[in-house]
Structure formats: C-alpha cells, structure tokens
Image: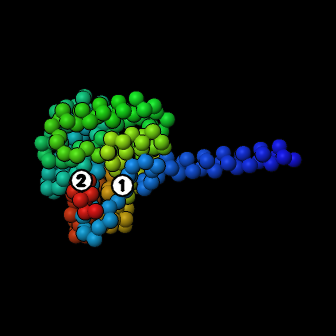
Amino acid sequence: MQIKRFVFFSLITLIVMAVLGEQLMYSRDFQLFGKIVSQVKTNDKVVALTLDDGPSIQYTDAVLKILNEYDIKATFFVVGQEMHRFKDQAKKIVQQGHELGNHSYTHPRMIFKTLPTIRQEIEKTDEAIRAAGYQGDIHFRAPYTQKLLVLPWYLARTNRLNISWSIGPDSRTTAKLPKDANTMTQYVLENIQPGSIILLHVMYENGDASRKALPMIIEAVQAEGYQFVTVSELLEQN
C-alpha cells in the first residue's frame, strides 16, 4: 500500500513539475533570475515596435524604407550569425538610428544549453552588434522566449534585461499572429495600450504578411494617438 502511495505521489510531483517547468519556460513576465519585461507601466501613449531575426539581404532595405517613410525608430533583435553574413544591412540599421538588441548567435532553444554555450551565443552577438557601429545599451530577447535556469542566471549576472513582448506570437502554442495584414493590424489595435511591446517577424520569406501589415499597423496605432519609441526609450518611462 505504501509503495502504491509513493508511486502515485511521485507521478503527481513529476506532473506538477513538468507543468510548472513549461509555464516558466514560456512565461513572458517571469523568470527565476534577473528581470524580464513584456510591457512597461506608463500613462503615456508610447509603444515599442520590435522586429526579430535577420538582418537579411532580401528584406532589410524594404523594412528600413517603411520605417523611414513614417519617421519612426524600431528595435531590431538580431541574430549574430546573420549580422556577420550581412554586415552592410546591419550597418544600415544602425546608421538610420534604430536600436539593436541581442537575439542570440544561432537562434537555438536555450533551455538546456550549458553555460559556455549560452555565454558564446550572447557575447558573440554583442560583438557583432558593436562591430556594426551600435553604441547604445544592448538588451536581450530569448529565442522562442524559452528560458529556465542557466540563461536567466547569466543574464542577471551580466546585468542584461530579457525583453519579451505583450503583442505578438504565442510561443507556447507556436501560433502566429493572424495570417493576413488586415487581421494582423486589427489584432494589434485590439490589444494596444500604453507601454505595449509589439513583436513582428519581417526578415524572412515567411514574414510577408507582417511586412505588408507594417505600414498599416504604424498608421493605425498612430491614429490612436500613440508614439513609437525604442525599447530603451520605453524603459525610461519606468
């Protein structure tokens, strides 16, 4: 009887740990060490537009053209190996006054990586960002938002913020934003509020809907009286 109870409670414990581990892994608002930011508390109508991945030789110029037309600054969370492949595109992002953030070097799932691997993923990308001429603070965004113990510990130890998002894909279910530009824009409008951090993927071929939605989202959000700022500028609202 005692053995059956032991097995039963052991199974329950494992299930609870697995559920809590998944919650922690994908949470946009909580991690065990350091600070993760999905939204900033403010009464001012300011929001941050963040663009993940890249740069890419196919789409960087087109995205920069749109941002320039509306005279707004975005935060690009870039991948280190892409920075090395497309150095000219990386430099253009910096030259046009946008913010660069660290999105790892190879975009791996960083939940079961060793400390040396995590250090290399982050530090090599920081080096690429500095090589592109960027001089501001470098914030970090975990690929797929996934983290457990070692990544948050290293971020906290090196005084880095983990920046997630309040409007964007659901990493846990791998569900993306609505598939077409119109519904994507409507989704953003329905969820926008002061201090929101918006995430779009515009750097690769599968980001076609996001690229089409980008000017529509900018116009719609501005029509609601919001101003776009970089992540660092948004953090100053705290």
Question: Is 165 on the left or on the right of 146, as rendered?
Answer: left
Percent x, y for residue 223?
22, 68
Percent x, y for residue 160?
32, 45
Q: Amino acid at mark 2?
A: Ser
39 vs 115: above or below: below
Residue behind mark 2: 232
For the residues marked 1 and 2, what is the alpha-carbon distance in whole angstroms?
11 Å
1 vs 196: above or below: above
Quadrant hosting residue 123 = top left
SS type, badge 1: strand
Residue positioned 25% across, 63% down in the render:
237
Most foreground residue, 169 or 24 = 24
Q: Amino acid at mark 1?
A: Val
Residue positioned 23% across, 33% down in the render:
128
Residue positioned 29% across, 51% down in the render:
50
Q: Is residue 52 visible?
A: no
Residue behind mark 1: 37
Most foreground residue, 212 or 23 = 23
